[in-house]
Image: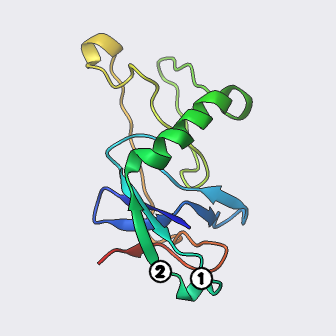
Amino acid sequence: KYWMLTGREQYAHPLVYVHPTRKDSCMMFHCGRPFCAGWAVDDDAPNPSDRQLTGMLAARKIQDELTERLDAAVDQIGVKMKWDEGDFAINDNLGNCHYAAPGTQNDARKAGLRILHRTTIAGEAIPTKLDGRTSFLLR
């Protein structure tokens, strides 16, 4: 029913989709701004191929609630890193939630130097809902 609209080129990605390798249900959303421009909502037509987008919600409407719930549960379901010089991590960006803790995005003179190298492998998988619908570009 909900589709996250990216801040770039207005792609719509399903909030709930099938992880491409594990095949379990996952959620896709950005915890931080500006990467989520809003949420599209589709109708409840019985046949998924007949469903149409019927409304839009502001990014904060869903994003803030999801982030709040994750923050409340992080000690039970998450991993918090206490980084030391030379530490290295690799994560499955298709199946986890990650964001920088408050204060880590401050000026390097205040928070210390934080370097993040990101590698994206293009074309591996298109997020797909259980009903077969996939991410799409809004026109």
The one nearer the camera, 52 or 89, is: 52
> In the image, is residue 57 above or below residue 18?
above
Task: Describe the element under mark 1 as helix, strand or loop.
Answer: loop
Query: Residue 67 got which mark?
Result: none
Give coordinates of residue 23: x percent, y percent.
Answer: 72, 66
Rendering colour mode: rainbow
Residue at horizontal 61 percent and vertical 52 percent from the top: 95
Q: Residues within 10 Å of mark 1 (few under 14, many from 20)?
A: few
The type of residue carrying mark 1 is: Ala
Mark before the other along the chain sequence, 1 or 2: 1
- Could you tell whether 43 is left or right of 59 in the image? right
Q: Residues within 10 Å of mark 2 (few under 14, many from 20)?
A: some
Nearer the observer, 64 or 125: 64
Quarter that holds the C terminus = bottom left
> Residue 1 location, x and y as percent?
56, 67
The reply to whether residue 49 is in sight is yes
Q: Is residue 128 above or below residue 121?
A: below
Kindly indicate the quadrant of the structure image that contains residue 112.
top left
Q: Secondary structure at mark 2?
A: loop
**Residue 52: which disc?**
2
Snapshot quadrant of residue 107: top left
The mark found on residue 45 in the picture is 1
Query: Residue placed at 40% from the left, 40% from the top?
Result: 32
Residue drawn at x 67%, y 31% as measured from the top left: 73
Compute the Cα span from label 1 to label 2. Answer: 8 Å
Give yes or no for contact between labels 1 and 2 (Cβ–Cβ under 8 Å): yes
The picture places residue 76, in percent across and down from the top left corner, at 74, 29
Answer left or right for 87 relative to 17.
left
91 to 24, vertically: above or below: above
